[in-house]
Image: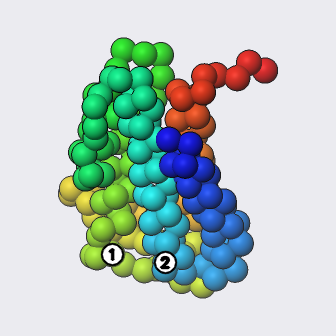
Amino acid sequence: MKESLHDARQELKRIDHSVYVSLKYTRTVDVIRNIIQRMVNTFGFGATALLKFAVEQKRIEDFPKSMLLRAELVKGLYTGEEFSEELRDMIEFFLLLRKLNKTEDYTKIKEYRRHVAMITTIDDKGYEINLDEINEYYVMTKRFIELVDEIIYGKEDD
């Protein structure tokens, strides 16, 4: 559990560098796709940490290897608690990131410029992932890891 959370934090550091350094200077869709891949990894580590925590609490005996099934199990395990709605939204966001990561049908626009973007369609809905969108995704990914931390270790009082 601690190892998974540590791995998630390490991925967050890599995402941070990619967003604020690599993307700033290269402005390519390849960097955007790399950031999305790292976000998927971060969510995967966070979900694994939650499931290991559930095993420790004896809420479940084991969890599946498939990340899709793990995500669904996390949604099912943590219902009826104060953070459950936010966690559910985060898992839905994770599932969207997975689809964005797996898509091979995308268009690159304005590479090497401020408004570089990856345009794709998933489930009949169009997505334009640009610098601003990636920043929002990064904030949501950081919040997910904070939420996992709060669930496992409890909320810290300011």
Residue type, numbered disc 1: Tyr
Residue type, numbered disc 2: Val
* Image quarter of the C terminus: top right
Image coordinates for residue 11, horizontal then vertical, percent:
58, 59
Q: Please rate how many residues cluster around mark 2, counting C-alpha atoms within 10 Å: few if below 14, some from 14 to 19, many from 20.
A: many
Q: Up-down: is 93 above or below 110?
A: above
Return the residue nearer the eye: 28 or 58.
Answer: 58
Q: Whole-Å distance between the Cαs marked 2 and 1?
A: 10 Å
Q: Which mark is residue 151?
A: none
Q: Up-down: is 97 above or below 82?
A: below
Image coordinates for residue 157, horizontal then vertical, percent:
74, 18
Return the residue nearer the eye: 45 or 158.
Answer: 45
Q: Please rate how many residues cluster around mark 1, counting C-alpha atoms within 10 Å: few if below 14, some from 14 to 19, many from 20.
A: some
Q: Up-down: is 141 above or below 105?
A: above
Image coordinates for residue 113, horizontal then vertical, percent:
61, 80
- Rendering quarter of residue 72: top left
Find disc 2 in the rendering and name its residue. 29
Name the residue rendered at 56%, 43% in the picture. Answer: 2
- Rendering quarter of residue 21: bottom right
Q: Which mark is residue 106?
A: 1
On screen, residue 139 versus residue 17, left or right, reads left
Q: Are marks 2 and 1 in contact (CB under 8 Å)?
A: yes
Name the residue rendered at 25%, 53% in the picture. Answer: 66
Image coordinates for residue 147, horizontal then vertical, percent:
55, 33
Which of the marked residues, 2 or 1, is nearer the chain's N terminus? 2
